[in-house]
Each structure stands twice: as structure tokens, then as C-alpha cells.
Image (spheres, rainbow, N blue to C red):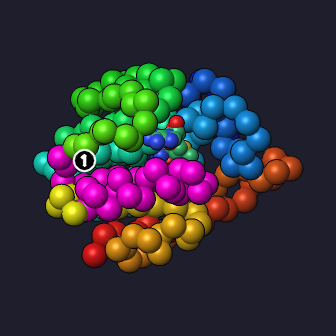
Amino acid sequence: MEESEYLTLPLVPEITLHLPGSSLFYEFAGGPQWKTPWPGGQALARHILDNSQELAGQRVLDLGCGCGQVSVAAGMSGANVHAVDTNSGAVEACRANLERMGLSGRVEHLESLDGFTTEVDVLLVAEMLYAEPLRRAVIPWLLEHLDRGSSLLISERGKVGLERLPVRPVAEHEVPGRGAGGETRLYKAVIWRSV
Ligand SMILES: C[S@@+](CC[C@H](N)C(=O)[O-])C[C@H]1O[C@@H](n2cnc3c(N)ncnc32)[C@H](O)[C@@H]1O
């Protein structure tokens, strides 16, 4: 798990991202969040590839795509990928990582979720419920899109906010990363599906 320009995801060795300056250091202490392939996103990418028939041919939205690990897994599974993020660095990284894996997809920068709507079959969300202001923006938006007929796969390390969504756990993964002292440790992420 050395730092380099390229990062092969420990839980998803099928995916190597171009991510200069990234690491698997998950005790977040500032810096752009999108540079980290978060455990929730890795777990979701693993789940997607292990169940690739589920997304083949589906229109998916990767909400808060970050470095693009979930989008890449969805593209590898044959999904029609739309990815969005409020950070322009994330948008560039996701777009570049799709391209270098030979995948197509639409990657879009958003100022916020206000006024943004989309028609997709499956919403893909990873590590987007970790702070209350984010939960206040994301949860109503997800509920609105579930009402419109989309389904949801969401992967989180915590549980806070999930009780406000009609979801049930379907899988969990332990994702190798680095703890506060640089030691290797496992981070559990649970994948939830809309009911
Ligand atoms: C913790 S990172 C998770 C990234 C990716 N899903 C993963 O698992 O690696 C959260 C991402 O959400 C983006 N973000 C934050 N607020 C957002 C919003 N309101 N709409 C879309 N993206 C947002 C951030 O820029 C960041 O890339």
C-alpha cells in the first residue's frame, strides 16, 4: 500500500486508479476528500463487480463520485454511468479514471443538489452520510428519487442517517487501509439496498 501515482484497490484488484498523492489513510485530516478511495466506495465497487449482472444495461448515477472507483466498477459491469460531484477535482479524476479503464460515462460538476434531478434506474452512493449537513442535503434528495422509481445501493461505514431511508443491509466488506499511526487495519463498510 505504498503511495504512488497509481493505486490498485486492495479490495478490488481489478481496478487501478490514476490518483497522484493519494493513500489509503482513512483517518481524514484535511486535504481533498476525493483523492481517497474510501472504504465505503471500495466495498460498493466490490459488490458491484461480484454482482455485475445486476447493473448490466442499467442507467446508474454515482452521487459524490470522488476518485471514480464506484463509476469504474459500474462501467466494467456494463452500466450506463452518470457521475456527479461538487468538487471539480473529483470530476476530473473520475472522468480520467473511466477513460483510462476504457470506459465511457458522463461525469458532471454540480454546485449542489438543489435543482438537480435525474432519471436513472439505480442510485449508487458511498460515504455520503458522514456529516449532518451532508445528510440534510442528500437524504431528502434520495427519498425524492426513490419516489420517482429509482432504486438505491448505498455503502457506509456508519449507520447514522440510514434509519431515515427505506433500506436493508445486503452485504458487508472489510477494507484494508491505514490507521492513525500508519498501521494496516480493516475498515468495515455495509452495503444497503432500497426495499
Ligand atoms: C467521502 S467522499 C466519497 C467519494 C466516493 N463516493 C468514494 O467512496 O470514494 C464524498 C464525496 O462527495 C462529494 N460531495 C460532497 N457534497 C456533495 C453534494 N452535495 N453533491 C455531490 N457530491 C458531493 C465530495 O466532493 C466527495 O468527492
Q: Tag 1's secondary structure? A: strand
Q: Which of 103 and 118 is in front in this view?
A: 118
Q: Quadrant of the C terminus?
A: bottom left
Q: Give the range drawn in magenta.
A: 119-146
Q: In which quarter of the image is residue 23?
A: top right
Of all residues, the one furthest to the front in this rendering is 115
Q: Where is residue 170 in the image (x, y as percent from the top left)?
A: 38, 74
Q: Name the residue under label 1.
A: 60
Q: In this view, does 114 lie above or below 26?
A: above
Q: Position of residue 28 (x, y in %)?
A: 72, 45
The verdict on residue 135 being magenta is: yes
Q: Is residue 161 above or below residue 145?
A: below
Residue at horizontal 39 percent and vertical 27 percent from the top: 109
Report the number of discs: 1
Of all residues, the one furthest to the right in this rendering is 181
Q: Which of 116 and 24 is in front in this view?
A: 116
Residue 170 visible somewhere in the drawing = no
Q: In the rendered view, does 158 fall on the left or right side of 84? A: right
Q: In which quarter of the image is the N terminus?
A: top right
Q: Where is residue 69 in the image (x, y as percent from the top left)?
A: 44, 41
Residue 161 visible somewhere in the drawing = yes
What's under tag 1, amino acid-wise?
Val
Residue at horizontal 13 percent and vertical 48 percent from the top: 57
Q: Is residue 80 above or below residue 106?
A: below
Q: Where is residue 5 in the image (x, y as percent from the top left)?
A: 60, 24
Q: Alpha-carbon neighbours of circle 1 within 10 Å: few (<14), some, or many (≥20)?
A: many
The verdict on residue 190 being magenta is: no
